[in-house]
Amino acid sequence: MAQITPDPIMRIAIGFMAAKHLFVANEIGLFTGLAQGPATLHELAAICGIPRRTAGISADAMVSLGLLERDGDRYRNSDTAAVFLAGQPGPDLRPMLRFWNRISYPGWLALEDAVRAGAGQAKFGEFSAEEQQIFSAGVEAFSAATAASLAANYDFSTHRRLLDIGGGTGSFLLAVLRRHPALRGTLFELRGACEVARRRLAGEPEGVRIDVVEGDLVSDPLPPGHDVLLLANTVHVLSAAHNLDLLRKLRVQAALGTHLLLVDLWMDPGHTQPPAAPLMSGEFLIISGEGQAYGEDDAEAWLRETGWRKAERRPLGGPHSVIVAEAI
Ligand SMILES: C[S@@+](CC[C@H](N)C(=O)[O-])C[C@H]1O[C@@H](n2cnc3c(N)ncnc32)[C@H](O)[C@@H]1O
């Protein structure tokens, strides 16, 4: 029989150290500091404005995780770090790391309390202006690839008005409206998120086709007159009861045939795949106080109960997929 070792436990348990080292490397500018080429520790410390000794601790941790490479006394970005973390044109995951470092990481300290109590403290509506900016920009970075994939893989050409509920910075609306010049969009969000979104949309040509409406999806009426409705990563910040209420509220004002798009980390019947989803359940719980990752089976049951017919579920790349439903 193969020897049983504690290695899997150790690997998982030091995972928080790997994550925190990565967040710190991002904050001190290790990857952007190497964007122009390799540097010695002495040079790197000067670029980041930190002591040489602790620059070494951070840089060597990144080498051990494969995000930096070391050649003699010179460090350079790995291909992955160069593409996603060095601040170059193209995809940029730095805002997501900042969000997880500044907001999620401290929030996870309360995971035990939330798991014991069955719910956590909601952070939405409680953010300072700076935290709201970090949160909204971080979520946009997290879901940028999903937004691009939805815009490319779902045919919006038959629709006129798209309502994005809990739409963050409006990044999904931008991705879709860029491809469909005749489409108009409405962003429905909490007040703090709307303030960030207005600044974000002001810099985009498609912004003039987007109405920003402040409100609470639990207690306020939703903007009427849309023929396609989007909930992207919003179901997972709500309890099952609030999701049922929301789908019912949407159905009451939707014309027959209205399409509803539910973008999320929908899990398999065993609720363990995709593997990121059960882990991120903890994140959704501590950020919203009531959310979690859900299974496709959960969504099917809610849709049946509230007057929607599920048409299909399409993969969107990574752990995300979209459930397409129609008002019947
Ligand atoms: C995980 S983010 C998703 C943002 C965006 N849809 C995306 O996928 O990038 C969830 C969003 O729901 C919004 N939200 C949470 N509770 C809400 C409520 N009661 N009413 C309106 N929006 C809410 C939050 O402000 C947040 O921007």
Image: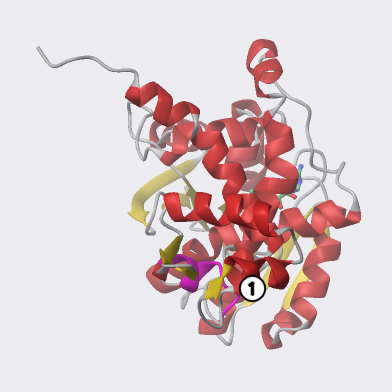
Q: Residues within 10 Å of mark 1 (few under 14, many from 20)?
A: some
The answer to whether the residue bearing label 1 lies less than 8 angstroms from the nearest atom of ligand 1 is no
Q: Residue shown at 72%/63% (left/top)?
A: 187
* Nearer to the camera, 254 or 128: 128
Extreme residue in the left direction: 1
Q: Is residue 169 left or right of residue 75?
A: right
State the image coordinates of residue 175 (x, y, percent, origin top left): 56, 74
Q: Is residue 80 left or right of residue 232?
A: left
Extreme residue in the right direction: 128
Quadrant location of residue 85? Answer: bottom right
* Nearer to the camera, 72 or 89: 72
Magenta stretch contains residue 39 = no
Location of mark 1 (residue)? 43
* Nearer to the camera, 118 or 7: 7
Say if 113 sits above or below 311 in the image: above
**Which residues make up the magenta segment?**
80-88
- Please name the amino acid that badge 1 sits on: Glu
Q: How many marks?
A: 1
Say if 116 sits above or below 317 in the image: above
State the image coordinates of residue 148 (x, y, percent, origin top left): 48, 70
Q: Residue shown at 48%/61% (left/top)?
A: 146
State the image coordinates of residue 181 (x, y, percent, origin top left): 57, 87
State the image coordinates of residue 53 (x, y, percent, origin top left): 66, 53
On the question of residue 160 being in view, the answer is: no
Question: Which secondary structure lies at badge 1?
Answer: helix
* Nearer to the camera, 57 or 219: 57
